Structure formats: C-alpha cells, structure tokens
Image (cartoon, rainbow, N blue to C red):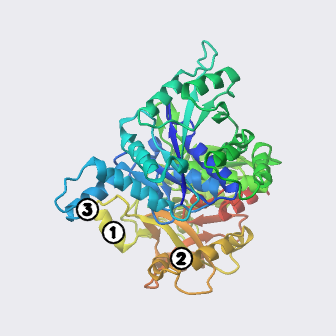
Amino acid sequence: MPRYIVVAGGVMSGVGKGVTTASIGKILQEYGYKVSSVKIDPYLNFDAGTLRPTEHGEVWVTDDGGEIDQDLGTYERFLNIDIPRRNNLTTGQVYKAVIDRERQGEYLGQTVQFIPHIIDEIKDRIKKASNSYDFIIVEVGGTIGDYENIPFLFALKSLERDIGKQNVSYFLVTYLPIPSHIEEMKTKPTQQAIRLLSEHGIFPDFIICRAKRALDTPRKKKIETYANIASENVISEPDIETVYQIPLDLEKEKLGEKILKEFGMKAKKSPDWSEWKKLVDNILKPKKTVKVAIVGKYIDIGDYALADSYLSINQSLLHAGASLNAGVEIDWLDSKKFEDSKKSLNELKDYDGIIVPGGFGSSGVEGKILAANFARANKIPYLGLCYGLQLAVVEFARNACGLKDANTTEINPKTSSPVIDVQPAQKEILEKSMYGGTMRLGQYAAVLKDKSQVLKLYEETGRLKEDEKRINELVKDKSQAFRLGILEKGRKIALERHRHRYEVNPKFVDLLEKNGMVFSGYYERFDRTRLMEYVELPNHPFFIGTQAHPEFKSRLGNPSPLFYGFVKACGK
Ligand code: GLN
C-alpha cells in the first residue's frame, strides 16, 4: 500500500511549497522508492486552461492533455517522471463529478451531501492517483486557514482514519519573516499556522521553515515546544540560489532518514547525489555563459512583470545549460519595441540566440516575425516554440517565397496566403466559442526525418530511445496509439506535448520546401493527414521551430533535445 505525505502551507503562499514537495519526492527516490505527487487546487475552475497566466503562472500541459497548475511541472522536473492529469484535483472537478453522477441517477434517492459524497470523491481520486507507488506526496494548494481547502483537509484526515496514521505523515511549510525594522526572525506566524492546522485535527510531523536565513537554535526550540514535535523534525530551509539545491540542503538535515524512520521503513538503496550535485554546481558556477533573448509579449501587473508565465522555458534553458556546463543569461524583450523601431532590432546582435515562445493573438506579432527574420538573416541561433514556429514560417513565406501577404489566419483571416491555418475540426469549435480544453492538447507522436538536425538531437540526448520505451507501453492500447499518431512500427518517433489550434497549412508545404525550408517531422493522423511538427533551415547554424512545447518535457539531468541543441549552438 502506498504511504502518503501531506504537504500544507502556513502563513502565506509563494514560499516554495511546490519545490519542497518535489524535493521530498526526489529524496525518497534517491532512497530507492517509487514516488509520485498529487496537487490539490481548491479553486472552482475545472482546470487551469482558462486561467490568466499572468496571475497564476504558465499553464502546464500533461501527456494526456490536462491543463494544470504549474506545480505539476515542478514535480516532473525534479522527479523525471510523467505525471497524468488525474494527479491534479480541483474543487470544480470534485463537485462536477458528484453532481454529474447525481443527474445520472446514481445515488438512488439519497440526499447528496458534503459528507460523505464530496469527501469520498476526493479520497477516491487521491487513491486512484496512488496505484503502484510507494509514496504519494499530496500538496494542498493555498494556505492553511483558507475556507477553500477545508474539504480537502477533512478528506485527508478521513483517509488517515481509513489507512492508519502509520501510513500518513504531515508536513507544514511555513515562512519566518525578518521585519527590517527589528532584524529579528519571528516565529509567531508559524505558531498561528500550527494552531490553524490543529483545528482540523492535524498535527504536523515535520515543519519546514522557509526564511531568508537559516533557523537558529532558540527559534527551533520555540517552534518545537509550540508544535509539540521533536526539534529534529523542525527543518530549516533558507533562501538559496537555485531550487535544485533544496533536496541537497534538506538532506544535510537528514530528512530522508527521518521520513523513513517516521514510517518505520528502511532505505532500499543508499542515495547517490553525485550526478545531481554536479548539475547544481554547473548551475552555480558554469564554465561559460551564453546570452539568450526571449522575444515575446509581456504584461505587467502593477509594478511587477510576471516571468512565471514562461517558467518552463526558463527551466529548460537552465537544464540544457546544466548538462552543457553553461550558464544561460536570459533577457525578456517586448516584441512591440521592434514594431515601433526597426533600428532597435540591432540589439539582437548582442545575443547568442533568440527564442520566440508560444503565444496567442495579434499583440506584438509583427515584432516577433521581424525577430525571426533577423535571426535567419544574421545566422543567429533561433528556436521557435509553437507560435515561434508558426511565425517563422510566416516570415519565410513572405521573405523567401515571395508571398508578401502571407500570414496566420489567427491574425489575418483574409490573407491570400494562409500559410498557418486552423484545422477544419477546430473551426467549428471557434465558431461556437468553446474555448475550455478544446485545443490540440497533450502528447502527440512526430515521425522524424532521416538525417535531419532534429533527429540528430533526439538521438544525441538519448530521448529517441526513451520515447521508444514510452511508445512500447502506449501501443498496448490501440485507440491511444491511433490518437497519438503511432501508426506503423519501426519509425523514428518523438513524443512532445501540444497546446495550440493552428497548423502549418499543408497546401503550402511544397512551396516552402522548394525554397529551402525543411520539414523535419510530422504527425500523421489515422486518416493519413499529415501535420507539420518541426521545421529547420540547413545552411544556418541553428534554426529550428517546433509546433510542440518541448519545454514541458525538460528535466534536470534529462534536458529537452531542442533546448540542448540550441544552447550548444549559442555557445559556439
Ligand atoms: N496561437 C497559436 C495557436 O493556437 C500558437 C499557440 C501556442 O503558441 N501555444 O495555434
């Protein structure tokens, strides 16, 4: 039976509960255990698909097409596992499932109530996500004291009653402020968080104390007395330079051994942190540094611009850099600037590489197209992600194929050269304004072209082999294999995640190819329709675009092939 570790946050949000959850998982993996995580988001939205990324950070996409809060991404990046959508629970999903069942008459005359129906639904979902794992780490979103997470705490307590306290451990992640006018670390908010948690019958077994500085002994003692736990289970987690240091720091406090002791378990293997340490060292002290411009659309909220809306891209560059022992300095450039003054494009000369990330709508689009053109003309490494591929194709059609009016129909529905267009099935959805969960979402297979740069990168990084293993699992379910586009054996296939509506228009592929653009991978639908997945330009040091979002499959120690190739090219 799986053991459960519940992670709740006290004091305030944004102190690194997700990273702590992921780090606990990473530690237990190092001790030889199979670990996965569940994220609870107490909002009423069904999923994160329609949330504003500037408020909640980027939307994370799972293999099976879930649009989820980015914490699931943090888990995948640390644990190097693929986590399915069912590992994310929202209040909206829970209530919807119960009400749908009631409408279908499944409760036969019963009064449907918070207890037991909602609680059972929550427990059921957590249990379903736990199959075949030794440990499941459940992160409760929000902060203790929020009205919204009460049902979930209640359900977890009930789960504890079902399976016994010996199989559940509670972590409280708190924050200890150091007000500048007194320069003293304060434990009071943590004490209050402990009390609030106890109102739910939950007494933490571990308290992780986030703060600017490490916790000193008097304060550790204070918390220990207040929470009535052993001081060795009050763990200090001060600010650090890179989040990937956290498992190492927590291990300095022997967290792994302490957790296993709590469950009465022993290590299955002795942890070997050498590889992880080397990667962290590379992040902290890289041998060289490359400079990358990400040309996108940026929205400020008040005085803060939220770089979190491109978090996965940041992380992917970091992972690629760590594997290549290169630091990546990132500048975020607003593409609108290039529209206002073409001269300002020359700024791009200062960069070793240019990325045009995913995006929607017309804001700053012409600036992004200008940036793609600049990268192509000046032989600066270019990586186009989703919209970044589409706009690179528009640029190429206009300036290398003479289709002056070329565009994506997302921007100009009346263009005479719709090189990027919507698939017929998506047209209907757009007409009906059905926006929730209706894009081309999740993992799809791309058949890679022999001798292409893209294929070489998937081979060089070992990803092709890894995907081969995934495919061998996936084809066991024929309908799944069909959906993904795994139609024949023996093809060289890459699996990446998607989130978009528009595609390269098949009608223009020949013309684009004649003028030198290489389509180095395609998705083949069961009706044999081909959708282009990768483009590249020979005679350019590195010019690659992908219709997918490879940033969702980048992990520390297992970087995304395209990011790896891009950072390598930037270093040359
Ligand atoms: N707006 C484009 C589309 O829907 C690109 C989406 C993206 O970059 N994720 O196809």
- Judged by depth in the image, the label closer to the viewer, 1 or 3, is 3
Q: Disc 3 and disc 2: Cα gap in Å?
A: 30 Å
Which label was assigned to residue 427? 1
Amino acid tagged 1: Lys
Q: Quadrant of the C terminus?
A: bottom right
User: Label 1 crowding class (10 Å Cα cut-off): few <14, some 14-19, many 20+?
Assistant: some
Is the shortest distance between ligand 1 and the CB of mark 1 under 8 Å? no
Which label was assigned to residue 101? 3
User: Label 2 crowding class (10 Å Cα cut-off): few <14, some 14-19, many 20+?
Assistant: some
Residue to which mark 2 is pinned: 474
Residue under the image location 74 percent in, 60 percent down: 569
* Residue 410 appears anywhere in the view: yes
Residue 358 vs residue 413, the one in the foreground: 358
Residue under the image location 71 percent in, 79 percent down: 451
Which label was assigned to residue 128? none
Q: Disc 1 and disc 3: Cα gap in Å?
A: 31 Å
- Judged by depth in the image, the label closer to the viewer, 3 or 2, is 3
Residue 151: percent from left, percent from top:
36, 44
Q: Secondary structure at mark 3?
A: helix
